[in-house]
Amino acid sequence: MNEVTARRARGGGGSARRAERTAVRMDTAKFITRNIPNFEILNEEALQIIEWNAETVLEEIGVNFLENPAALQRWRDAGADVRGERVHIPRGLARKLCATAPSSFTQHARNPERNVEIGGKNLVLAPVYGPPFVRDREGGRRYATMQDFRNFVKLGYMSKWLHHSGGTVCEPTDVPVNKRHLDMLHAHMTLSDKPFMGSVTEPSRAEDSVEMAKLLFGADFVDRNTVITSLVNINSPLTFDATMMGALEVYAAANQAAIVSPFIVGGAMAPVTVAGTLTQVLAEVLAGVAYSQLIRPGAPVIFGAFVTSIDMNSGAPTFGTPEASHITYGAGQLARRLGLPYRSGGSFCGSKLPDAQAAYETANSLNMALLSGVNFMLHACGWLEGGLVSSYEKFVMDADQLGTLHHLAQGVAVDENGQGMDAIREVGPGGHYLGCAHTQANFKSAFWRSDLFDYKPFETWEEEGARDTETLATARVKKLLGDYQQPALDAGVAEALADYVARKKDSMPDAFI
């Protein structure tokens, strides 16, 4: 695709501009820029101990790079001690390699107004990722389908406080495993104009992601810019498998972003202590980020930390716990000391329903992530049942509450208007502020207000059916999907994407494993 075609793809072309004039205008908030300090739970001594221990793990214990001879050779060439498939990384080598990774980068959306800056003081919010099941109030819990996937992409596009379309918002089990990534990518690219994530379930699927992005943005643009973020999970403890490393190799070589993220359940995949878990997290991230820089120095990468604890009675993962918060706070400090963007947090809960348990655990998790200095928050809305379920109602409930993070992050204004002295003088003792000039000038923006919750008096609430929050969320899901209008896309680009998906799917038999 040449530069002219690339510009048409990004701007939408004539047909796209005509469609845009009749489309519903979506009000999407810009990514968060914090004006509040990060909470730092570890002192300098603790940080140095954890960093020293992580380097000891890399050098003395080592990490496995399985079924990937090329990766082993790259490590040998870099100066590591490779014994079988175990890589022992000399103290300081991984950190030196990580130094070429950027501290922040732009992920471009096909609508430039939706571009996001990942790193620094910024926080980008993306929806739930990976559940094989979905749930709604009327249909209950069931296996996800491609129609569910498309619905969640639409809900994400319609959600004001979400900045990113995400990736596997649910796993569409009615499409063959070897082909579903094509339909999922096509949905993100055509049903939304927000940034999106690529496939990592097999290296060839990562290659498809890059090729489809070139059709959407133009090959030259993709070669020079980051348009994909991907999630590369580490098989904790200390193991990198060929599938995830293969995907990382594809994205790093193409200068596309990867989240290098240990998948930690404390007590199962890591020690039960906070400092022990942080040591392992740091060792795994150092090895993964360093490897991405062996592929291509300067490739964008994000320090990931998905951390939960385990219920020692049932073995089930638990969420919203103090220990997970300690680890998330500490990992944020370690990421900033490495100079890397940080991914963690989400609307985590272990509840089976969008109920009080879900709300408590989710609120704890979201606020902890904001204060931890997270730059990219996956699972920001829709997560239910420990990540097994994408919930329609919880998606819109969480997405609504993400507005509180935006307002909390603004901090406290102490300019002339923020001080409010004119109002205090005008009202004086014994008066009220409802009618004063300062209130009249600020009332529309003074307080954040939920678009979902019921603030009516009891009598009105009762007359309207005494609806609980889940009932209100069901109605909101239907309204958002009913109001949805597809964002404009150049007809030639849309045709090229559809043709690519059709040809790739026709080129291979169905496989469900």
Image (tube, rainbow, N blue to C red):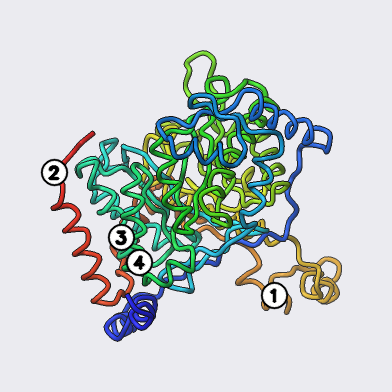
| Whether residue 288 is situated above or below residue 454 in the rendered picture | above
Say which residue appears at 46% left-offset and 42% top-offset: 232
User: Upstream in the sequence, badge 3 or badge 2?
Assistant: 3
Give the Cα separation between the discs numbered 1 and 4. 56 Å
User: Upstream in the sequence, badge 1 or badge 4?
Assistant: 4
Question: Which mark, by number, is residue 435?
Answer: 1
What residue type is disc 4 on? Lys
Give the Cα separation between the discs numbered 4 and 2. 25 Å
| Quarter that holds the N terminus | bottom left
Please tell me whether mark 1 sits on a helix, a strand or a loop.
loop
User: Upstream in the sequence, badge 3 or badge 1?
Assistant: 1
Q: Callout 3: 10 Å neighbours few (<14), some, many (20+)?
A: some
Q: Are marks 4 and 2 in contact (CB under 8 Å)?
A: no
Tell me the quarter of the picture where residue 440 sits.
bottom right
| Nearest the eye: 212 or 173 | 212
Residue identifier under label 3: 481
Residue identifier under label 4: 214
Residue 474 is situated, as x and y percent measured from the top left of the image, at 34, 50
Question: Which mark, by number, is residue 509?
Answer: 2
Give the Cα separation between the discs numbered 3 and 1. 39 Å
Q: Which mark is nearer the camera, 3 or 2?
A: 2
Tell me the quarter of the picture where residue 321 sits.
top right
Question: Which mark, by number, is residue 155?
Answer: none
Give the Cα separation between the discs numbered 1 and 2. 70 Å
Residue 192 is situated, as x and y percent measured from the top left of the image, at 36, 64
Q: Are marks 1 and 4 in contact (CB under 8 Å)?
A: no
Please tell me whether mark 2 sits on a helix, a strand or a loop.
loop
